[in-house]
Amino acid sequence: MQPSLVLRSGRSAWKGPYFVAFPNLKQALEDHVPIRTQERSCTILPNFVGIRFMVHNGKDYIPVTVTQDMVGHKLGEFAHTKKRFVYRMTKNR
Amino acid sequence: MVHVLGVALPDMQLARLALTNFYGIGHKTAQRLCARLQIHDRSKIRDLTAQQITELASFLASPSTAPPLRRMPLASPTFQPPPASTPIEVLRKRVTELSKPTGAEPLRNLKIEAEGRRVVRENIAHQRMIGSYVGKRHAMGLPVRGQNTQSNAKTAKKLNRVNRFG
């Protein structure tokens, strides 16, 4: 059974998905060069499959390798923006 | 107390409301179900005949393979019946044309109980497998849809799991 990919698209269907035409897409496919991008809201299209992206999370660039299952989602979903909360009681009270 | 597909339906409850006891059926779907199976709006479970209950059970067992309900349209106020001399085949043909089931079958994709839970589990597993934010939040047992965590995350902390429903 196919899990539902079209859950909360947010954008009207008649507008089509929001995506960015990366200039070095062909090069990334052939030479496996990662694409550095700050376009977190770019929808992953079927022709992105197999490409390595370096997605910005505000500070660093997180490597994301696109698979077939990721197609309807956005790039930013795979680059977490917050550090994991760890409780450390400071010594200087 | 009638048992249908493993779920107990209390006798004193309205049939339309008792159907919401199934996982995957809410008030709207229950209303549609009663319309589909021709159960009266105000009938209680104890008023249903054995045939109605078997119909209900067989429909819910596999909603996608159930035979479609034929249409029974009412005549308009200005309806003129055809003359008595019309041949019976013409009349029969007209009846079959009128009672053809329409294309829209909103209950065909109904998923109940185990199947419904499986859908939810598969969606969560898919999000976890691709490594998305939603999957990570399920794994951490925290709210997924951007709710506050500094306070008030009790339900999410209790229920959000990667393999929900055990």
Image (cartoon, coloured by chain):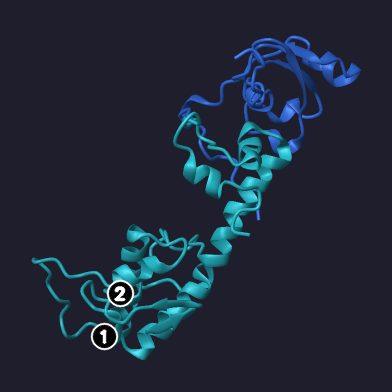
Chain colours: A blue, B cyan
Q: Which numbered marker is on residue B62?
A: none
Residue toward you, A85 or A23 = A85
Please state if B32 lies on the left or on the right of A21 as rendered: left
Label 1 resides on the chain identified as: B
Q: Are marks 2 and 1 on the same chain?
A: yes
Position in image of residue B133 (x %, y %): 63, 32
Mark 1 closeness class: few <14, some 14–19, many ≥20 residues within 10 Å: some
Seen at 37% across and 59% down, the residue is: B26
Q: Which numbered marker is on residue B15?
A: 2
Seen at 63% across and 59% down, the residue is: B166
Contact (CB < 8 A) between labels 2 and 1? yes
Residue toward you, B140 or B48 = B140
Position in image of residue B27 (x %, y %): 33, 60
Q: As displayed, is residue B43 above or below residue B78?
A: below
Seen at 28% across and 75% down, the residue is: B13
Position in image of residue B87 (x %, y %): 27, 85
Seen at 78% across and 11% down, the residue is: A24
Amino acid marked by disc 1: Asp
Q: As displayed, is residue B2 above or below residue A64?
A: below
In the rendered image, the quadrant that contains the N terminus of chain A is: bottom right
Direction bottom: furthest residue: B50
Direction left: furthest residue: B78
Amino acid marked by disc 2: Ala
Please state if B3 lies on the left or on the right of A60 as rendered: left
Residue toward you, B63 or B113 = B113
Q: As displayed, is residue A59 above or below residue B53?
A: above
- Regarding mark 2 in the picture, which secondary structure is present there? helix
Mark before the other along the chain sequence, 2 or 1 = 2
- Regarding mark 1 in the picture, which secondary structure is present there? helix
| Distance from the alpha carbon under mark 2 to that under mark 1 | 9 Å
Q: Which numbered marker is on residue B47?
A: 1
